[in-house]
Image (tube, rainbow, N blue to C red):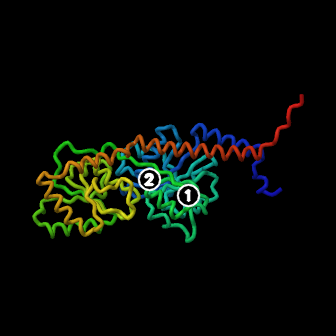
Amino acid sequence: MDQQQQNQPTLEETIEKIEQSIKDLESKNNKIFFLTQDTKGTQRASVAINYQFVKLLKDSGYNASILHEKDDYAGVGEWLSEEYTSLPHTSIESGDLQVGPQDLLIIPEVFGHVIEQTVDMPCKRAIFCQSYDYIFEMLQPGATWASLGIDTVITTSEASSEYIKSIFPGVEPIVIPLSIPEYFKTDEKPKKPIVSIHTRDHRDTMKLIKSFYVKYPQYRWVTFRDLRGLTRKDFASALGESCVAVWVDDVCGFGTFPLESMQCGTPLIAKVPNLKIDWINEKNAIWTYELNQMVDMVGAYLKSWLEDSIPEELYMEMDKTLEPYTEAHESSALLSFVEKVNADRVTELTISLNKIKPIEEPIKQ
């Protein structure tokens, strides 16, 4: 008998392992890993959402943790609070990642290489698609999630779900609506003449600011504030005191910034993204399809704001837009997803167990 045969588990050991996996799933002792990108300390909504999901699962008794590739993971301590930074973290590089058939590994769509590298892992794998534009970023030509053994996908909007189904027929994504933290709130003091701006491409930020001051020199006393590099709470505070927010993100999959602005009571001037997200409607913000129009829209808005003539309907629509995006809805959808995955996994393991268990002889009378 060679070494490889000696290392093969016996039938009894295999049965015991599957039975233990089923017990772990039923008692929430299975591990749930959210693979998370290292942004080197830079604030990013997609990373904050991973931390929020892990926190919600931990609060509900699940064994969830943040998974990162390298030991030198910078973390989120510079921009997220201690309740998030204290969550469990696991490193792949350190060798701490030990998984069994009961465990769940959730991989962001941008980690195409990890999807390929984990094909032979015994755990359940799922995709978390927040940015549809990155789906093919690291996938080999012709590869699909299904061809790499993935049949479970979560995303954050119906629009993103429909797009995923259009490129990967047979995949039925599960939508988990996001929530906005409660510290995004209206400032009790009057709004200041500050324009908070948030764009995916920093060049768009500078183009908007510079062209505005050239076209509207009478508003040179108005401050533009680029919100990059702030902590989450400073980010929220800045939005709360601003009189208007400006947003440009053509390839967003959900768009937390506009909802954060609305929750702060700060009207939004925005370019409609390529994928029209569920919450977008013509009444809850000032929308345009043309980037070059935004400078004039900011100028017109400031004139109306100074004249105290912003329509009340805009604020009413902002409040109405926020109604589905509560932590209660987010938590309910997330827990339903995990419960279904675990229940399906128990069924799969039970079927496997019944196939290999010896048939017991009937007791003679």
Disc with the residue nearer the chain's start (1 vs 2): 2
Q: Nearer the viewer, mark 1 or mark 2?
A: 1
Residue 6 can be seen in this image: yes
Above or below for 22 versus 297:
above
Marks 1 and 2 in Cβ contact (< 8 Å): no
Residue 37 can be seen in this image: no
Q: Which residue was labeled with disc 1?
A: 171
- Looking at the image, the residue that sits furthest to the bottom is 141
The quarter of the picture where residue 200 lies is bottom left
Q: Which residue was labeled with disc 2?
A: 156
Q: Is residue 131 left or right of residue 284?
A: right
* Crowding at mark 1 (Cα within 10 Å: few <14, some 14-19, many 20+): some
Residue located at (38% from left, 57% from top): 277
Residue 151 at what x, y percent from top left? 58, 56
Kind of element beneath mark 2: loop
Residue located at (32% from left, 42% from top): 182
- Looking at the image, the residue that sits furthest to the right is 365
Residue located at (54% from left, 62% from top): 168
Residue 124 at what x, y percent from top left? 60, 51
Residue 335 at what x, y percent from top left? 50, 42
Residue type at mark 1: give it. Val
Q: Nearer the viewer, residue 245 or 222?
A: 245
Q: Nearer the viewer, residue 299 or 163?
A: 163
Q: Which mark is residue 213?
A: none
Q: Quadrant of the C terminus?
A: top right
